Structure formats: C-alpha cells, structure tokens
Amino acid sequence: MEILVCVKRVPTVGGAITLTADRRAIDTKASGFTISPHEECAVEEAARLVERFGGTVTVVTVGPAVAEEQLRACLALGASGAVLVETEPGVEVGPIATAAALHAVAAAGRFDLVLLGNEASDTGDYQVGIRLAHLLGWPAATGIKALAMDDAAGSVSASRTYRGVLETFALELPCVVTVKEGINLPRYPSLPGRLRAKRAAITRVPGLESAGASAADVRMTSLRVPDAPKKQATVLGQGAEAVPALVDVLVELGVVS
Amino acid sequence: MTVFCLVELDGGTVDGGAAGVADVSLRAITLARGLAAPGGLAAVVFGDPPVQDLAAHGVTDVYAVSGIDGYAPLAWARVLQWLMSEPANPELHESAGESSHSAPELPGRHAVVAAGTERGNEVLAHLGAITGRPMAANCTQAVDNGGDGYAIVRQRWAGLLLEEAVLEGPTALLTVATDAVAAVPDEAGTTATVHQVAPSVDGSDLVVRAVETPAGAGGASLATARVVVGGGRGVGSADGFGPLEELAALLGGVVGVSRVVTSEGWRPHTMQVGQTGTKITPDLYLACGISGAIQHFAGCSGAKSIIAINTDPAAPMMTRADYAVIGDLHAVIPALVAALRDRAVPNG
C-alpha cells in the first residue's frame, strides 16, 4: 500500500501569541516549529497501515526550505520518502494553491491513500483535503477518528461522531481521508528512525507557478489577537471554605435552583 | 443579494420527536442576515424544516430538500450549487432582485453560509471545489465590500487569532464559527415561504454517504452541554474523576478534560476540550485542576461563565476565569457535592 501524508510546518504555540510588527505573521523569534497533532496522527495511521499491508509512506509539505525539519521528524516516525514543494519564505499559500501543489505530487505517484490532518492548526482552512480529492477525482472523508481497512486493502471504513451520532463512511481506494487527534496515540521516534531520518534524501520540487496560485482565494490582510476578556476573577475563597460562596454563584448563574 | 443558509437540525432523529434548528445554525443565520438583501435570506434544510424557528430568525424562504437518503456531503453540495445557480431559481432570484432595498443591489452576488461544524465545513469545501470558488471557514464577520469580494474576519488557531481577509469573487462561500457569533432572533421576522424541492442527484455524488449509528456519550453532548465540569492534570489519575462526574450529574452537565488527561489515557479523546478536541459553549464551565494552556482556551472561550478551582492562583485559567477558588479540587469538589446534595433534600 502506497500512502501519501500531507503535513504543514506551523509555529509551536505555548503561552500568548505575539505578532510581527506588520501584523501579518506570528512572531516566531522565540518559538520552535512543529506539525499539528492531527497530522502526527495521520503519519502514525499511515505507518500502522504499512506495517500491516506492506508498502511505503511518503510525506509531503508545501512550505519554505526550512520545513525540511518537519519532514525529517516524520521520516523518524516511519515515513520512508519525503517531498518538499518549496515556497517563498514569509509568503502565505492559500488553500486552493496548496491543494494544487499537493495534487501535482499526488498525481505523479501511484498512491492508494492520501491522509491529511482535518485542518492545519494555524490557518484552519478546513478544505485542502477535499479540494485535493476533487482534483484527483477520488472520494473523500473528513474529520475521521477511526479508520478500518478491509483485509484486501480495497476499501476503508472511516468514522467520526456528529451530534451524538456515529457516522461511518465506506470508501473505495484510492481515496483521501482527513483525520483528527484521537484516532491513535502516535509513537515516539526510535533511535534508528532518527538516524535514518537524518540521512534520508528529500525530494525538492521547485516553487509552484501553477494555475492555483493566481486563482481567487481568501487573501489575508492582517492578523490580530482577540481582546482577552478583561476579567478580574472574583476569588470566592480558599479550599472547602469557599463552597457556600460557590453554591451562591451557581444559584446566581441559574445552574442550581 | 440572496444568501442560502445550510441548516443543521438538532435532535428529532433519535427519539422521533420534531427536530429543531441546531443552535450553531441559528448563529450562522444571524451572520447571514447581515449579508442578505431584505427578502433574500433562504434556508436549505435536508429533512423536515422547523419553519417557525427559521422565520423568527429572519429567513424568508425555506427550501425543504427531499429525495436524498441520509447525509452525503457531495450530494448536499450539488443541491446548494443547483439552488444558487440562477436558471434553477428564476422566482427567488427575481424577487430578490426586485426588492426595493435602499442599498444598491449588485448583480450576480450570492452567498452560501453554513455553521462551522464537521458537516458545514465539509459541504462548503465540496461546494468550493466543484464551483472553483474560494471558501472561508469559521468566520465571525462578513460584509460585501461592493468590489472584488467580501471583507471577512475569520478564526485561525481555533480562535486564538483573528484573520482579516478578502474573500475574493462575487460568490461568498463561508462557514460561521460555532463559538463566536450569538444567535439573535430577527424582530421583523414573521413568515417564510416553504419550497419543496426534490433535485435529481447523480449516483456518483452519493458514493460517500454516512451510515448513522448511535454513539456512546462523548463529543457531541460535550459540544452542546449547558454545564461542563472540566478536569485537568490536577485530577491526578483516572480514578480521580469520580467526584467530578458526580458533580456534573448533579448540575445536569457533562465532564470535559484537558489534553494531558487524554494523553495520559485517564479519559478518552472524545472528552477533550480544546483546539484539537471539542469546542464548548456552555453557560458554565467549571475548570478543576486545569492550568489553562492556550490551546485549551481555544476550546472553552465560548463559555458564558468560567469558575476555576486550582491550587495555583497564578495559573492562566485562574486569571481568565470569572470566579476562582484557590485550593485542591480533591477537597473542594466533594464538599461542593455534599452541599448540593443537602440543598436537594428538603429540610425536615
């Protein structure tokens, strides 16, 4: 089974988010970079499928040259090939152009399955996987929390919960599936894996001048951190002695009669 | 301008009762109303439409779609594409075009709006792909800029950042953040005209279709619960959740957890509140032993009120809460449970 996993380099966000002076990016002078938890799970899911059915996992990103760091992290987790579609540093690539770039890579290989995170943790566009599926002419399922491949590896059963109901989609391969954290618990990279990742070759595809780049899209003009609610927490007390005051608040809020 | 709103229904499927409009869809309709010309706010419902609810929120036309069995995202997107294409709807588009609206009505401008749920984002992404148009997910504002498109504000990082952007082109496809826009009834809203439509759909658009089975308690009830009792690292173990569950039951709520709890395996991921878990919008979030990582706030900032219980008064959750109790949850929660039980028993 040949699997392509799409990942994206994003800042590691810990405490408060600070923006650059032009308010068009997150200030990353003091932060590292990572991929989203959903994508870590996509890589893990692909590695498990290949352990069961054989084949390879190729990981791809559309990003600046430094996104090599994230590709090598994925190689340490079980991917055996990596492709970097290189973009200009500091230039955002919208969801339509990203899907077009991924399509070029996906269509050039013989993949049975393309996995993505349900949404990138930074831009949260919720559409790259579906646009890619349409370009490939493949079926797609999104937001998936459980994936069961049939023994012949010809179809997959993909499920998620929606308003208290379990929704299960049956898809024939080849197909596109976007997954969410919780589908599995990703492994830690092994030492041999890390050594292999250091040496592995990365296929570089030059920056895209494809049709997608000039299409109408959502164009960011500026970013802002939402005003934190100017709250001054009312301290109700210390320990169990605070319980009467706490009950009064619950009554006031209408959750206790 | 005509705005089509994909409406999701709440309940009614499981127990056979009449379904209402999901709260997230009322929020989406409220945002859509600001874009629509008078008489141009249309709701699209796959199933039996709760017409009064929709009319009360300003909807003037309801399209009740039948003939598609179950949820099939691509088929739903095709129906929206068909509805927004003018030849399919001379009646609606004429009436919207002839409205005596004070603002100049720009020809050829439409919008399709849905709630930023699994289904809403999915169907609109399909619609974007089949029409070749851009789609903006999880918007909090949208205004027709009268020129190259729409000025929007949308959530990034699950709402930790806001993006101001131009959604380019005459057709706006957008979803509305589920935790940032309040649902407001329309004072002028009175009646809506119901149009029964049974579009023909290609079999190929029905290939991906949901088979629905009841799920265990979890993610969904968390998203719609009015009270959520949250537990974090401070709970200390899987067994430590007993008192929190007891408290949640007393308050008619559910338990949610922080990411560390699921990565420790104390509780399943379906209970996780946060950027990569569930976004909650309860009246009360009672956060116990949760320090408050920024990704956790992305999931709980839609709560109307937050009470935090923590041993560390400087924890971010304590400083951003409305009320704080400084102390060990293992002492506070059992005492609170006891106090609530005493209240429930009428004094002899």
Image (tube, coloured by chain):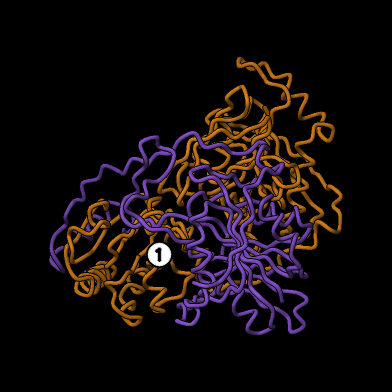
Q: In the displayed structure, does residue B7 sit left or right of residue B323?
A: right
Chain B, chosen colour in render: orange
Question: Residue A58 sits in which quadrant?
Answer: bottom right
**In the image, what residue occupies the spot 60% across and 66% down?**
A82
Amino acid type indicated by mark 1: Gly
Relative to residue B238, is residue A118 depicted above or below?
Answer: above
Relative to residue B140, is residue A141 depicted above or below?
Answer: below
Chain letter behind tag 1: B
**In the image, what residue occupies the spot 62% across and 66% down?**
A5
Question: Residue A53 sits in which quadrant?
Answer: bottom right
Residue A44 in picture, x, y percent from top left: 55, 74
Chain A, chosen colour in render: purple
Residue closer to the observer: A57 or B67 = A57
Quadrant position of the N terminus of chain B in the picture: top right
Residue B136 in picture, x, y percent from top left: 59, 42
Residue underneath mark 1: B253
Q: In the displayed structure, does residue B46 sit left or right of residue B341?
A: right
Q: In the displayed structure, does residue B186 sit left or right of residue B4?
A: left
